[in-house]
Image: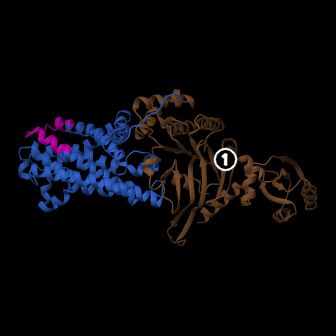
Amino acid sequence: MLSIETADLSRTYKIKKTRKTPASTLVALDKVNLQIQQGELFGLLGPNGAGKTTLIKILTTLLGPTSGSAKVNGLDVVSQSRELREHINMVSGGETSGYGLLTVRENLWMFSQFYGIPSRLANARIMELLKIVGMADRANTKSSNLSTGLRQKMNIVRGFMTDPKVLFLDEPTLGLDVGAARDVRAFVREWVDSDPTRTLLLTTHYMVEAEEMCDRVAIINQGRVLACDTPKALKAGLRTDAIYTLQVDVLEDEGFEALKALPGIRTASRKALEDNIELELVLEEDSVLTRLIQFLADHGSTIRTLHKREATLEDVFVSLVGVSMKDVENSNADQDYQE
Amino acid sequence: MQTRITKNSGWKQFFQTVVGRAYPRVVGTMRDLNWLFFDIFMPFLTMVGYVYVYRALKAPEEYIGFVVLGSAMTAFWINILWSMSSQLYWEKEGGNLALYIASPTSMMAILLGMATGGMLATTTRALAIFVIGSLVFNVSYALVSFWTLFGVFVLTMVALYGLGMMMASLFLLLNREAWHLANFVQAPVMLFSGFYFPVRAFGFWPGMVASIIPLTLGMDAMRQLVFPSGTLIGLLTPHVEVLILAGLSVVYVLAAFFMLRYMERLAINQGRITDRLS
């Protein structure tokens, strides 16, 4: 049974004219077609500005689509938004919801009242969930005194306490330390697994998070879904096991461009380290390595380290977009700065 | 997870929301005691200033009572401006507005909760100012009818907080720095509503125009009901003012309802109202 379904879902924003820039239209989502089954933990993976949050806003009835349609739990997000809100909840990474003067338990209780949960049940539920996330001893702490990690755990409890049929988590581990992020991931996975009628849609720009947690992943960039499958199938789709990470002492721009044009090199990315240059290379087959080593030697580059590794979703992203997710984010940031 | 969740809907959910959203305001009064200084001591100083001006001018002693009453009612106007009208703007900045809209409850219930909580918390402040002012300046009252006075006060509050609910949506729609808007209307309303003097001093028609702010008529009626010479300086009779206040209550609450619906529709169509700093 389908839990979330979108058909040619698009959203554009009109950008007003300013003294420096003319009026324009920003395409945030471009004909997105997704079908998410009940019981799935589905990930939307993409760089900042890819359209993930826009999609979540539409699915949680906070934003109308410009064209196309979307259904959640069988209800249309535009015409049946009021009924739909009974069945969903959402949590965003880094959100500062609630009131600092209230304790953790009081904040959660307040939100439970908006969903019509009787106080006695709400309080019992809140304490259960706080125990699960390891915050029972903080129930009476004012939320203004919580660390970022604890605050996010409180937000997570807020999302789960209403027992939604479909839960949307927008970058839920944003800004969390490693331990807190691990706890949140484990809790999210367990929540989906414990009831097959629950569905969870998670957005993230952390590859490892998507790979570890999600049953299926859609890779999204510039408002378009570029691929959608299980992490395993997406990686298998690269049809190669020749992924190498090399550190060389030097490689100029010209040399790097020539390297990318070498026969047998599918994708190449470069990152400057403190002393070395790191190259990420996807080769058509291992035999290309011989040619590569010769090429580097001819260009005066000394190989410091060389590792062969398994394909990751990052490699999938690079193969689809041509550059790494980090590069896309940096490029977006540069554009924003120039504007 | 053992607890099975059941959820109320309809009016039960509506009233739960009102209580839930009123809670932070009521509890906040007890937890953050800054209001004792900022909301009682500071207005008290303003009150002292007006009292000494009237005494220097040898105004009738009842004018001291007008100042005490006006100072107490000022607390409600300040609450309407800074905690009610600006509230949805602050909720947006804090990230709560999106959660309110995405929840199954009515936004009207959320606003009503804010209003109820604000009213309860502000009544404490207003009462404190009223009692302290009356004792310090030895103000004497001649109550005509307690129930009429109570009715006027309740209607004034309903109309005033209805106006606050309407302004909450309006401030958000204008999408400007909320404190600029609040600053813009704070002083003119305090002048034209006659917080410290009978509004009739401006003349009948300017007084009627000022009556779009419910406090104008509310305070005018209260002055007539608690001070012997009140009827001589009243804008209209208390009964007519009660009728107008009832009308204003209906108009402002309905306007708040429609403004909220419009605001929510705009938020969904344009996608900017729930965004912080949009």
Q: Position of residue A332 (x, y in %)?
A: 64, 60
Quarter of the picture containing the N terminus of chain B is top right
Q: Quadrant of residue A33?
A: bottom right
Question: On screen, A108 above or below A303?
Answer: above
**Marked residue chain, label 1:** A
Q: Position of residue B250 (x, y in %)?
A: 23, 52
Q: Residues within 10 Å of mark 1 (few under 14, many from 20)?
A: many
What sort of colour scheme is used for the picture?
by chain
Q: Position of residue A233 (x, y in %)?
A: 74, 49
Q: Position of residue A239 (x, y in %)?
A: 81, 53
Is residue B143 a member of the stretch shown in magenta? Answer: yes
Q: Residue at x 41, y 52 (%)?
A: B89
Left or right side of A103 for B248: left
Magenta region, residue range: B131-154
Which chain is brown in the rendering? A
Which colour represents chain B? blue
Left or right side of A226 for B5: left
Does residue B229 appear in this view?
A: yes
Where is mark 1, residue-wise? A216
Tally the marks.
Answer: 1
- Foreground residue, B258 or A146? B258
Amino acid type, callout 1 = Arg
- Foreground residue, B36 or A293? A293
Residue furthest front in the image: A1
Q: Residue at x 60, y 49 (%)?
A: A36
What secondary structure is marked by label 1? strand
Is residue A188 a member of the stretch shown in magenta? Answer: no
